[in-house]
Structure formats: structure tokens, C-alpha cells
Image (cartoon, rainbow, N blue to C red):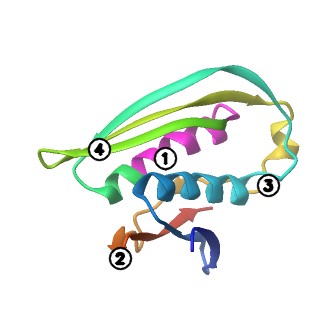
Amino acid sequence: MNGFREIKHTADIGLEVHANSIEKLFIFALNGYYKLALFDNYSSSVASEFNFSLIETNYEDLLITFLSELNYLLMVKNQVINPIHSIEILRNNHKIFLDFKGQLNNLVNPDKDITTEIKAVTYHQVKVTEDDGIFKTKIFFDI
């Protein structure tokens, strides 16, 4: 089964994410983050193409850095990536490389479109695992 579900937590909000590839895990984590932070029918206008690359030593750090960058775009700059054009994750020499491309959009009315202010992506209980081709993780966000 692929996708995400919200996890109830006393001080934060979280997601449990699962997918049949590491790239899909990152996409579902991003989609889940947007589901927590935005109204479904938010309005936006096209700004530009968005590309960025990351290098980390493990999937956990890569995921936290990835979501933190996108959290900054939404919470500080009122920008959202939609649609995602591509995401590529490669392992090489004890490093993991992420290349991400999407369309950057400006929220038209951020005060109404953002439902939950997410202060940060946390390391609480984050662990990316793979079992029989299924990648899983939990992600918690400080609100």
C-alpha cells in the first residue's frame, strides 16, 4: 500500500508514510505535509520553475532537509510546489543525492489558504526503513 496517514500526537502533528520506492516516499511525505498545512482548495498563481539538489549521508537527514526547505517556502515565502515534475534519489560513495524539480506557485491568499502553521520538521522518531520493497517512515512537525 502506498500513501500517507496522519498520526495523532500531543504536541506535534505527524505522518506515517509508505511507498514502493524511495522517490515515492518523498513525494507522499510532501503531499502529506501539504495536506496538513493547506486547505484542499487553496488558490495560487504560477511563479516559476523550481529546482534544487541536496546531498546527505542518510535518508533521514535527506528527508528532513527536503521537507524543511519546502516548509520554509510555504511558511515564510507563501509558496507551494505543484505540480512536482521529477524527483531523483541516488546513492553513491556513502552519500545520497536528491534532484528535485517542480512548479513554484505563490499563494493568492495565504492567511486563508494555510490551515496549520508548521514551525519545523523534527527528527522525533524519524527512521526510514525498507522491507520487501516497501519504504516506510514517520515524520513529526512542530506546530
Whether label 1 touches label 2, CB < 8 Å? no
Residue 79 place in picture, x, y as percent: 68, 33
Front tag of 1 and 2? 2
Tell me which residue sits at (34%, 71%) in the image: 130
56 lies left or right of 137: left
Of the residues shown, which amino acid type is indicated by label 4? Leu
Q: Main secondary structure of the magenta part?
A: helix
Question: According to the image, label 1 marks what residue?
Answer: 68
Residue 90: mark in rendering: 4
Q: Which mark is residue 132?
A: 2
Farthest residue toward the top? 48
Q: Residues within 10 Å of mark 2 (few under 14, many from 20)?
A: few
Magenta residues span 64-81
Q: CA distance from mark 1 to mark 3?
A: 18 Å
Mark 3, secondary structure of its residue = loop
Q: Amino acid at mark 3?
A: Thr
- Residue 44, located in which quarter of the rendered image? top right
Reading the chain from its start, which is encountered first: label 4 or label 3?
A: 4
